[in-house]
């Protein structure tokens, strides 16, 4: 492995370790009650190391925000020849559902409770949804009129958000992953059917 590759791997490992430590502290004490300094001390790193990896405290918990933002746009950009944008979004969502992917909400009750109890994290999640909508609109722009691209992106992002909120709600109600997936599947079908009709 090259020196650069090793450096990047260590950087990624440090980032993951800091995020795991922070998540544990947030679960134990609540997001608003934990400081960056406490995270740094618990992770055994300098406070500056934490802020270098995570300029925003919220992203210590929502550390997969880049994947959340890019996911739908990537599904559209990398779709199969002849596959429509709504079909690609549907396929990507159901693949994530089959994996019980944390990116669509399968994060566990403790994680969801931290988000539900923090206005700051809820605001950050709304911001991520807005960024995802803009990224998806940009991915659709080469083949659609600007307004149509924005409209479809808004509809798709709303479907993702509402499904996420439903997974969170069922998680807090005590349902397990399998029960949640079984309940979400017909709702997702309904959401993506509506998206397909809007695109036609």
Image (tube, rainbow, N blue to C red):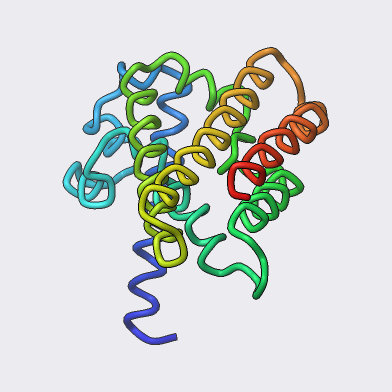
Residue farthest along the left direction in this orientation: 48
Residue found 72% across the figure and 48% down from its top: 94
Which picture quadrant has residue 188? top right
Question: Where is 166 relative to 73, above or below?
Answer: above
Which picture quadrant has residue 82? bottom right
Q: Position of residue 157 (x, y in %)?
A: 49, 39
Q: Position of residue 171 (x, y in %)?
A: 66, 21
Q: Does 195 sit left or right of 136 as displayed?
A: right
Which picture quadrant has residue 7? bottom left
Residue in front for this viewpoint, 123 or 154: 154
Residue found 63% across the figure and 16% down from its top: 172
Residue in front for this viewpoint, 164 or 8: 164
Residue found 56% across the figure and 23% down from its top: 110
Q: Position of residue 164 (x, y in %)?
A: 58, 31
Residue in front for this viewpoint, 84 or 6: 84
Residue found 54% across the figure and 42% down from its top: 156
Residue in front for this viewpoint, 112 or 189: 189
Q: Position of residue 101 (x, y in %)?
A: 64, 45
Q: Does 157 sit left or right of 164 as displayed?
A: left
Q: Does 89 sit left or right of 55 as displayed?
A: right
Number of residue marks: 0
Q: Does 171 sit left or right of 33 as displayed?
A: right
Q: Give the quarter of the figure containing the N terminus.
A: bottom left
Question: Where is 39 relative to 55, above or below?
Answer: above
């Amino acid at each position: 492995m090259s020196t650069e590759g090793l450096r990047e791997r260590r950087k990624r490992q440090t980032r993951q370790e800091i995020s795991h430590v922070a998540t544990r502290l947030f679960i134990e004490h609540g997001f608003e009650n934990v400081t960056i300094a406490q995270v740094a001390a618990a992770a055994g790193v300098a406070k500056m190391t934490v802020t270098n990896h995570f300029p925003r405290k919220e992203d210590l918990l929502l550390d997969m925000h880049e994947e959340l933002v890019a996911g739908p746009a990537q599904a559209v950009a990398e779709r199969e020849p002849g596959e429509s944008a709504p079909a690609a979004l549907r396929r990507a969502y159901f693949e994530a559902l089959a994996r019980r992917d944390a990116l669509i909400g399968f994060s566990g009750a403790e994680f969801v409770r931290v988000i539900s109890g923090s206005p700051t994290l809820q605001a950050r999640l709304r911001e991520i949804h807005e960024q995802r909508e803009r990224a998806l609109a940009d991915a659709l722009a080469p083949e659609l009129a600007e307004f149509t691209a924005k409209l479809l992106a808004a509809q798709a992002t709303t479907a993702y958000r509402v499904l996420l909120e439903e997974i969170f709600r069922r998680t807090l109600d005590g349902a397990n992953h399998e029960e949640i997936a079984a309940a979400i599947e017909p709702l997702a079908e309904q959401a993506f059917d509506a998206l397909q009709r809007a695109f036609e």
